[in-house]
Amino acid sequence: MKKYLSLAFVCVVSSLLSVYLYSRFLQSPRGGWSGNVGEVQYVGLVDKLFSNRSNSRFQSASPTNFIESAAIATPAVVNVRAVLVTGSSIFGGGSTSGSSGSGVILSPDGYIVTNHHVVDHGTDIKVTLSDKRTYNAKLIGSDPSTDIALLKIEEADLPFVLFGNSDSVSVGEWVLAVGNPFNLESTVTAGIVSAKGRNINILGGGASIESFIQTDAAVNPGNSGGALVNTLGELVGVNTAIITESGSYEGYSFAIPSNLVQKVIRDLREFGVVQRAFLGVGIQDLDAETARDLQLPNAEGALINRIASGGAAADAALEIGDVIVGVNNTKVRSTSELQEYVGRFRPGETLNLEYWRSGKKCRNNLLLKDNNNSTSVANTRGDELENDLGIALRDLSKEERRKLRLQGAMVMSIRRGSVVFDTNMQPGFIISSVNGTRITNASEAIEAMKNVYNALSLDGYYEGESDLYSYRFKKK
């Protein structure tokens, strides 16, 4: 009998001790389980008894719902098809091919952003909406240095997306890639931001800007020009490229940051060309050894290795060996970040630079210039002759002038059925003279053509061909 009484006593004491410990440690307002929605806290009993540390707290992730953001972005993503003519000459002929990609509607009146490489040299561009309506699109302007192009279709009350702030996008943040590949209607994939400020050397040319947002959202051929949106449905990037050995998605996709996209399309809409500002320096990334030699706290920033004579940096008394680490109170970690940030400004605007020199941090204001060391923006849109002649022009970039060893104006687009279209001239033609008068840029070409009363003669070259082409026609 005593045996059973002893056993019962042990059971009662154990039960009371269990209740006490439960009430003391697991229901304490200082720890244990909290019934607040969205917050789960766990406290280790060992930590409670043998440690003076604060209770460990783990915030549970909020449920991620992509339905709303997909519903916002999907109707605003379109399919873009461009007809390309290759191998043509003044005698006609040639072959016809096409490219296809995606685009994003930015305004209810039909402005659409896509990639430059989707519409490059396209003579006939068509846009298909998510509801299957198809429109002819006008190329407002295109910028190979950022791989951005702006299109326009004639329609109203279109669905569109709002711009988000790409600077606020964080590594690890959920994003959606929305495209309209191969006219299969919109496709949506999800992923996270893997990195920012990536330079993958795909655009070429010394003036190109590559500071991509890298994600693991699946992006395949045909998604170029599509939308990268956050979970609020805001546009934070334009999908541009993938790194692949097979030709299909392998886990790495890249998007142009929306803050850079905004500036480029604003320039294209207002001027027809990008108003590109330059610091007037050569820059390179740092390594740990160089940072140590320069007495820097870390290897972040852009090291100046060259100063252009007469450029913005020379005027601001910057020196070779200075390391730029901030622009307008925004931290700069690499050359790609610096190029992207400066690319958001126009010639004539002022930046406040933060940089290291001889182990000391300095600040200075810098007045930006263009590649000709001018602080003025270009006054030419490029499409001033579109209504009369059906032609749109742009200046040659510094890289194009160097590569082609030419000065002149490049033909961006030719309207089907126009007097210029009837000559068999093709986009990409570089006008070097108008009625025998040499021209050096688009402004001079446009002014010269406006001043001609009747017959026009345009002489010039195509890239990769040494023959001089001449096109003669009369104004209507």
Image (cartoon, helix red, strand yellow):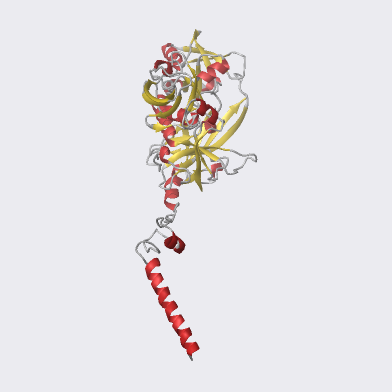
Task: Using residue 205 as the reference point, say whether residue 150 is left or right of it.
Answer: left
Left or right, residue 163 beside residue 411: left
Name the one closer to the observer, 101 or 338.
Answer: 338
Identify whether 194 is placed above or below 18: above
Between 23 and 452, the residue placed more toward the observer is 23
Q: Could you tell me which quadrant the C terminus lies in?
A: top left
Image location of residue 192, percent across then percent down: 50, 46
Residue closest to the eye, 203 or 313? 313
Asked if residue 140 can be seen in this view, the reply is no
Query: Between residues 398 and 5, which one lies in front from this camera angle?
Result: 5
Q: How many marks?
A: 0
Residue sitting farthest toward the left: 29
Q: Is residue 289 above or below residue 250?
A: above
List the single residue furthest toward the right: 246
Q: Percent position (x, y) of residue 136?
A: 48, 34
Furthest toward the bottom, the residue is 1
Q: Position of residue 33 (x, y in %)?
A: 40, 64
Answer above or below: position of 372 versus 227. Answer: above
Q: Residue furthest front?
A: 2
354 on left or right of 3 = left
Residue beneath the point at 54% across and 22% down:
428
Name which residue lies at 61% across and 39% down. 244
**Visible in this render: residue 103?**
yes
Estimate the x, y position of residue 387 in percent, counting from the top left. Answer: 42, 23
